[in-house]
Image: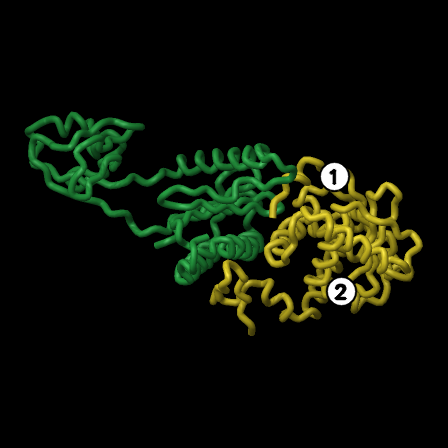
Chain colours: A yellow, B green
Amino acid sequence: MSRPPGRKQDNHKIDWHLPTISSSASAHHMSRELFVLTYGALVAQLCKDYEKDEDVNTCLDRMGYGIGVRLIEDFLARSAVKKCRSYSETAEMIAQYDICTTNHSRALPLPAWMSETCRDTLVAFKMYLGVTPSVSCTSATGDEFSLILDKNPLVDFVEELPAERASLCYCNLLCGVIRGALEMVHLAAEVTFLQDKLKGDAVTEIGIIFLRKTEDKKHKRNK
Amino acid sequence: MAIFSVYVVNKAGGLIYQLDHYAPRADAEKTFSFPLDLVLRLHDERVVVAFGQRDGIRVGHAVLAINGAEVNGRYTADGKDVLEFLGNAANYPVSIRFGRHRLSSNEKLMLASMFHSLFAIGSQLSPELGSSGIEMLETDTFKLHCFQTLTGIKFVVLADPRQAGIDSLLRKIYEIYSDFALKNPFYSLEMPIRCELFDQNLKLALEVAEKAGPFGPGS
């Protein structure tokens, strides 16, 4: 069990000696199966409680939202993300994204601040789910982009949706999480599933549409 | 004790957590006989020493207790006016405790909101675009360090000017907040933090930071 690493500051490291009961330290130790099974049980119970698929989807989204608003702080505290200050490194990020989205013919350069957000979303996915989605910009105005997930750990044990639940968005929790997290950093967004492997599509695609960038907040955001 | 206090301010400017970490200040309790050689006056609903500093009793110290009973602002525990009481020769000899008064929680709330506003003004005054708010406030007796997260929560630490490593402490406090306050399912966002685990871990972190001590030139 490793101690939380001391942060480099002022030419000396502080070893915090805090007990590693912090869940983020143990996030990578926790059994992923347990998490996936818990999620499955949650969705199954919701299906029993609600008849309509839309209700289940809304419920999952709401739960995800509650998780997202708290998870964002954990993510910000633990990753070294900085505010969108240096656009020179952002230009490199844009180039990197162009390379990784050559599979998708819709690749377009993202606006500077959004590419920072994209990069951070990818880091978050890696941190919490262990998968790295690829990102592409899907609109000319630069307001929308989508995350393509080849592997979705949440559906590891699900073969297909039952016939009577055809329009259920199984991973709607993820949408809620992303929406909640973005809202806490003053980026209102609409997050939906564009493609779902469980419904027969090739990949799982999550679409994120930025509704309105709060212009002043962008400049006042602090590290 | 090199770290004096920690304040956590939410997005709206309200104080959601406060911790005082300094050793009890030196109170001076002395027995006096009539006439009192200190000059006392009323200030802000408290009786403070205006002149006649001696023996550990400094100008600005407030009357904290008379004959062992804590005073209530300008009135003694039994409701008599302090200045009148001390002006009456019949009450002597009397034992008075002086010391620096502590901020009440209302005062702390008010000061936190004021700091929140000043922080915003700080970023607006900047000649550069996209400046941060106030990061450090320095006086001769303490330094105030402030860290604002991307979500708008501010962590404020008051520490000794020579204490180093406060930046890493602020980030550590952010981690502790995200762990023990946010992950507590019964804690609502933006509300006062009443989580035992948060308190405990915060105190641990403060102790570690203090032990790390001043390294090289103070930050």
Amino acid under label 2? Val
Task: Provide residue A161's location: percent of width, then percent of height.
Answer: 85, 61
Is residue B111 visible in the rendered image? The answer is yes
Task: Provide residue B104's location: percent of width, then percent of height.
Answer: 36, 38
For the residue carrying disc 1, how many other residues have a C-alpha within 10 Å: few (<14), some (14-19), or many (20+)?
Answer: some
Amino acid under label 1? Lys
Q: Earlier in the sequence, mark 1 or mark 2?
A: 2
* Residue B178 position by quadrant: bottom right
* Residue A28 position by quadrant: bottom right
Q: Nearer the viewer, residue A48 or A53?
A: A53
Chain of the residue under label 1: A
Q: CA distance from mark 1 to mark 2?
A: 27 Å
Above or below, comparing residue A63 to residue B53 in the picture: below
For the residue carrying disc 2, how many other residues have a C-alpha within 10 Å: few (<14), some (14-19), or many (20+)?
Answer: some
Write the residue at 8% across / 30% down: B35
Determine whether the residue tagged by mark 1 lies in a helix, strand or loop: strand
Of all residues, the one furthest to the right in this rendering is A105
Determine whether the residue tagged by mark 2 lies in a helix, strand or loop: loop
Q: Nearer the viewer, residue A29 or A112?
A: A112
Write the residue at 49% across / 63% down: A12
Above or below, comparing residue B54 to residue B89 in the picture: below
Is residue B19 visible in the rendered image? The answer is no
Point out the frontmost of discs 1 and 2: 1
Would you name the residue on which mark 1 appears?
Answer: A213
Quadrant showing the N terminus of chain A: bottom right
Chain of the residue under label 2: A
Task: Provide residue B19's location: percent of width, then percent of height.
Answer: 41, 48
In the image, is B104 to the left or to the right of B126? left
In the image, is A103 to the left or to the right of A219? right
Write the residue at 15% across / 32% down: B38
Would you name the residue on which mark 2 appears?
Answer: A131
